[in-house]
Amino acid sequence: MRALKAWDGRSCEAPGRRLSVSASTLHRYCSGATVPEESAVVDRLALLRGADEEERRALRAVLTSKFSQLMANQS
């Protein structure tokens, strides 16, 4: 997610609006503090940054794994 957040020095506010999430939520996703529950946000971010299908698939796999780890730690 951090790699996708290469906003060329811009804040998370404008891309967050385009993704229908707050700037703080987008920042938490990109910093790894939280993981989006919906892959749609990840797909929109990846498309916004020009990621191809292979990159989006790899990102979804990483996030699915991370989300599973977080859920296991909460049990």
Image (tube, rainbow, N blue to C red):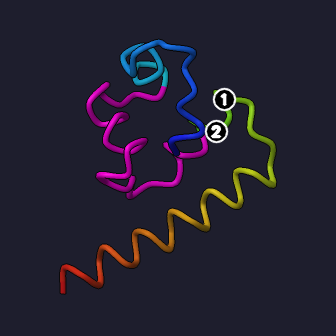
Which of 43/74 is in front? Answer: 74
Residue 75 picture location, percent across and down: 18, 87
Question: At numbered mark 1, what does the secondary structure look like: helix, strand or loop?
Answer: loop
The answer to whether residue 25 is above or below residue 15 is below
Query: Between marks 1 and 2, how big is the CA–CA gap?
Result: 5 Å
Quarter of the image for residue 61 reads: bottom right
- The reply, left or right, for residue 16 in relation to residue 5 is left
- The reply, left or right, for residue 61 in relation to residue 41 is right
Q: Is residue 63 magenta?
A: no
- The reply, left or right, for residue 20 in relation to residue 4 is left
The answer to whether residue 73 is above or below residue 19 is below
Which residue is tagged 1? 49
For residue 46, the mark is 2
The answer to whether residue 3 is above or below residue 37 is above
For residue 39, the mark is none
Q: Is residue 35 magenta?
A: yes
Q: Mark 1 near mark 2, Cβ–Cβ under 8 Å?
A: yes
Residue lying furthest left: 75
Residue 14 picture location, percent across and down: 43, 13
The residue sitting at 37% across, 34% down in the picture is 26
Residue 24 picture location, percent across and down: 26, 30
Residue lying furthest front: 9
Q: Residues within 10 Å of mark 1 (few under 14, many from 20)?
A: some
Residue 59 picture location, percent across and down: 62, 56
The residue sitting at 68% across, 34% down in the picture is 47
The answer to whether residue 40 is above or below residue 27 is below
Read off the magenta span. Answer: 19-43
Question: What amino acid type should be assigned to the residue bearing mark 1?
Answer: Arg
Question: What amino acid type should be assigned to the residue bearing mark 2?
Answer: Ala
The residue sitting at 52% across, 45% down in the picture is 1
User: Dominant secondary structure of the magenta stretch?
Assistant: helix
